Image (cartoon, rainbow, N blue to C red):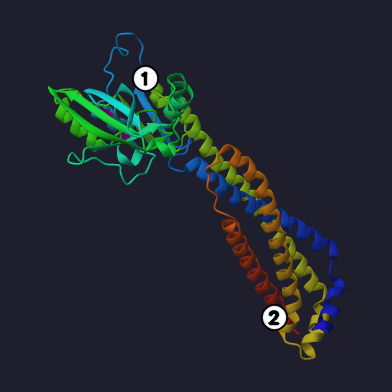
Amino acid sequence: MKLVWKLLRQHISIGQLVGFFFANLFGMLIVLLSVQFYQDVKPAFSQEDSFIKNDFLIVSKSISTLGGLSGVSSTFTEEEIQDIEEQPFASGVGKFTATQFHVAAAFGINGAPSFSTDMFFESVPREFVDVKSDQWGFSEEEGVVPIVLPRSYLAIYNFGFAPTQSLPKISEDLAGLVNMIIVVRGNGMERRLEGKVVGFSNRLNTILAPEEFVNWSNHMFAPHEDTSPTRLIVQVKNPADDSIMQYFGDKGYEIAEDKLDAGKTMFFLRIVSGIVMAIGLLISLLSFYILMLSIYLLVQKNTQKLQNLLLIGYSPARVSMPYQLLTIGMNAIVLVISIVLLGIIRNYYLDMLWSVFPEMDTSGLMPAILLGLGLFALVSIINVVAVRSKVMKIWKNK
């Protein structure tokens, strides 16, 4: 084996191999980094309670005067809702249903009453609620109303209301321990229910209760009131689609601009990640091509020596092995160095991400490592087969 290697390495171009090594290293690192970075930041953007959860818009009708709404009803008809559902940009529409009766709530901590206030509830279909809880539902027999509050309300309480009223600040974990008594009045009846905070929403800026509770209570305490929705939540396929603004503008509807901007941010994050990954793959493919071209040229230069080795009894597999080991070794070194550099870069950007999203979960290096191993295996197999095929042609023509 040493003799074969000494004969064949005479025409190896160190410059070509060095060029391939750094081009391949650069391309591999870009591919792995783009995949790993996307996996690391995705929870901050796409988890159920993410502040930038994309693709959802809150739609209402424009208010133009103190006494009315542009001369039209403030509620959405079934025909208007169906028209939105039929738009190409829409993939789902949900209705906000509000309580139509008087609601009061008394809050307490550790059994001691703290304050009471008038309030209201709204509901949306379960699939649009960005807080998943096994307690999300309502039974009249149990009389417990699960509640989802806007996360901004907790900040207002902790930094605005609590200090002025000498009340303790409440964390999200402690919010579920707050005692809440809900008193509902209407249709000549009154009922006291227990309330329980089960989560905080970044997507919906309203006090949410399950649809089962809102529908039951409206039927019980406000049977003659109109429960047509005044707001809709629309899931869109591409928040950067210009037809969204054009459609709602033509209809005179208003949408929450911050939700549209958040959706655009997530959409462009995906686009940029895809572009970076494509560039990395292109660089890697070019570097792999350079390697194959170098090996082919090397084999071509050594054709006479290869023929002589084959004539004196060396098998094609044995003659091919030095070239195959060279390509596999280069690819393996590139993979190992890429993973090491990825770990160093990842530790740097994770510190910045955790300073912004302290509760963000990360997936570890496994996605990038698996991708790197897959690319290594694929390219190595292609190189081995190509070299063996070239040597077999020389053997057949000897």
Could you tell whether 269 is left or right of 230 in the image? right
Residue designated by label 2: 392
Residue at 47% x, 39% y: name it: 50
Q: Pointer 2 and pointer 1: residues touching (CB < 8 Å)?
A: no
Q: Where the N terminus falls, by quadrant?
A: bottom right
Disc 1 packing (10 Å; few <14; some 14–19; many ≥20): some
Q: Residue furthest right?
A: 10
Magenta span dominant secondary structure:
strand
Res 114 visible: yes
Does residue 163 show up magenta in the picture?
no
The answer to which of 179 and 226 lies nearer the viewer is 179
Task: Look at label 1 and name its amino acid.
Answer: Gly
**Label 2 environment density (alpha carbons within 10 Å; few <14, some 14–19, many ≥20):** some
- Image coordinates for residue 297, horizontal then vertical, percent: 79, 68
Q: What residue lies at 85% left-to-right and 79% top-to-bottom?
A: 6
Whether 341 is drawn above or below 221: the answer is: below
Which of the two marks, 2 or 1, is nearer to us in this view? 1
Above or below — where is 258 with respect to 74? below
Residue 237 visible, this angle: no
* Residue 89 sits in quarter: top left
Above or below: residue 24 compared with residue 76 = below
Image vertical order of residue 376 relative to residue 157, above or below:
below
Q: Which residues are magenta?
A: 94-98
Residue at horizontal 74 percent and vertical 61 percent from the top:
290
Residue carrying label 1? 252
